[in-house]
Image (spheres, rainbow, N blue to C red):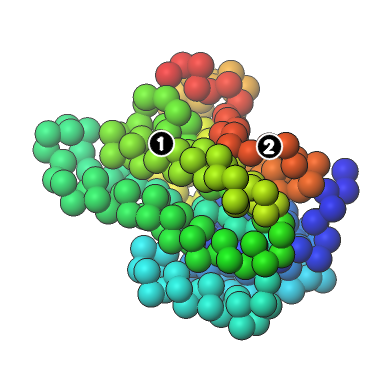
Amino acid sequence: MNLGLDGKYALVTGGSHGIGRAIALTLADEGCNVAICARNKQRIDEVVGEIERKKVIGKGIMADATNPDDVTRVVNEITISWGRLHILINNVGGGGSWGSDDVEQTPENVWREVYDKNVMSAIRFTMSCLPLMRKEKWGRVVTVSSICGRETGGRAWYSVAKSAQISLMKNLSANHDLVRDGITFNSVAPGHIMIPDTGLDKKQKENPGEFSKFVSENFPLGRLGSPEEVASVVAFMCSDRASLLNGSSVVIDGGQSRFF
C-alpha cells in the first residue's frame, strides 16, 4: 500500500532504539525524510546511516527530551536545516519499572520524573513543532503510550503518565484551529514488545523456559509483539489514508489487555 508519505519530513523522538528506531526506518521506507533525537551518539549515527541507505534524508541530534533547552534546540536545528516538518512521533518514554512494587515506599520524585519523561517531553515537542506543521497546513502527531495508560496493570506512576499522554492527544484533537489546519493527533498503546537490551529481553535470557511459559499462558498469540509491528500501524496513522483518524488511541497488543 502506498501511504503517500514520499517527501514528507518527520521527527522521531527517542528514535535510536526499539520502537522509535522501527518507526523511523518504516517512515523512511515510505519515502519520508527522518530526523531522530536521542542521547546515545553511537546509536544515533547507526540509525541515521540506516535511514540514508533508504535514499532519503536522515538527521540525528543528540538531546535529552526531559531538558526544555534541548527540545528547543532540536526543533531549531530542524527549522534551520529543513524549514518544515510534517510528522512528529512522541516516542520518548519509560519508567515502567522505576520505583517499588510498594506504592507507599516509592518517593514522590519517581512520580515527577516518570511524568516529566513521558508527558512533559511530549507536550514540549508538540508545542514546539506545531508552528512548522501549521505553516504546511498538514501535520500528524502520534504519541507512543501504552496499554497501561488505558487499563490497570502497570505501576501507578507509569499508568498515570501514559494515561496523560493519551489525554493530551485527545484534547488537542478537539482543537478546531489546529485540526482545521490539517493536523491530527493520535496515540498508540502497545502491549509487551520484545526489544533487545531491555527488561523483557533480560528476563528471557535469564530463564528461557519460565519466560516461554509465561508468554504462552498470558498472551493470546503465544508471543510478544515486535517494534516493527507497532511501526507499521504508526506509519499508516501518519498517512492521508488515515485522515479521519483523530483523537484515537489504537491498541497494539495482540489481545494481551483482555487479561487486565
**Can residue 42 be seen here?**
no
Q: Quadrant of the C terminus?
A: top left
Residue 130 higher or lower than 91, as above or below:
below
Q: Identify which amino acid the numbered label 2 is placed on.
A: Leu
| Residue found 46% across the figure and 54% down from its top | 122
Seen from the viewer's position, the closer of residues 20 and 86 is: 86
Which residue is most to the left? 105
Left-right relation of 22 to 54 = left
Residue 222: quadrant of the picture: top right
Q: Position of residue 90 (x, y in %)?
A: 52, 54
Residue beneath disc 1: 163
* Residue 48 percent across, percent down from the top left: 65, 71
User: Label 1 amino acid?
Assistant: Ser
- Nearer-N-terminus badge (2/1): 1
Residue at figure coordinates x 37%, y 24% from the top left: 152
Q: Quadrant of residue 81?
A: bottom right
The disc placed on residue 213 is none
* Residue, disc 2: 245
Q: Are marks 2 and 1 in contact (CB under 8 Å)?
A: no
Q: Is residue 165 left or right of residue 241?
A: left
Q: Residue at x 35, y 68 (%)?
A: 67
The residue most toward the front is 177
Depth check: give the residue in front, 14 or 244.
244
